[in-house]
Amino acid sequence: MHNPETPQSFTTADGLIHVCYDRDSFDFHIDLRPGFTRLQYAEVVDLVESWGLEFLDPEECEPNYLEDGTIRIWLTDPEAE
């Protein structure tokens, strides 16, 4: 398990949620695979928000729906802009 106080990419133990934290490439997103739970998602949201990441406005950048059913939600780091 990763250190939750240190922002870094990680995947949940069951593999259903992946957080990409790549400050060098300014790539911040959450991948939600089919079968994830609302509780898991809420915990991940709390964590990435504690790192200072924010969700992009859906009008600015809509989530992507990948071929395997994964939903990709884009985030931003206002401090890195």
Image: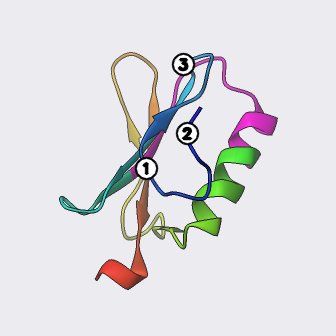
Q: Nearer the viewer, residue 78 or 55?
A: 78
In the visual, does 43 lie left or right of 29? right
* Residue drawn at point x = 43 percent, y = 68 percent: 59
**Whole-percent x and y of residue 77?**
40, 73
Q: Is residue 33 above or below residue 20?
A: above
Residue wearing tag 2: 2
Badges 3 and 2: C-beta atoms under 8 Å apart? no
Q: Residue furthest left?
A: 25
Precedes in sequence: disc 3 or disc 2: 2
31 part of magenta stretch: yes
Q: Is residue 39 above or below residue 58?
A: above
The secondary structure type at the circle numbered 3 is loop
Q: Residues within 10 Å of mark 3 (few under 14, many from 20)?
A: few
Precedes in sequence: disc 3 or disc 1: 1
Badges 2 and 1: C-beta atoms under 8 Å apart? yes
Q: In the rendered view of the protein, which quadrant contains the N terminus? A: top right
**Whole-percent x and y of residue 38?**
77, 36
Residue wearing tag 3: 15
Q: CA distance from mark 2 to mark 1?
A: 8 Å
Q: Which residues are magenta?
A: 29-42
Q: In the rendered view of the protein, which quadrant contains the C terminus? A: bottom left
The secondary structure type at the circle numbered 2 is loop
**Whole-percent x and y of residue 28?**
37, 56
Amino acid type of disc 1? Gln
Residue wearing tag 1: 8
Amino acid type of disc 2? His
The secondary structure type at the circle numbered 1 is loop
**Whole-percent x and y of residue 74?**
41, 55
Precedes in sequence: disc 2 or disc 1: 2
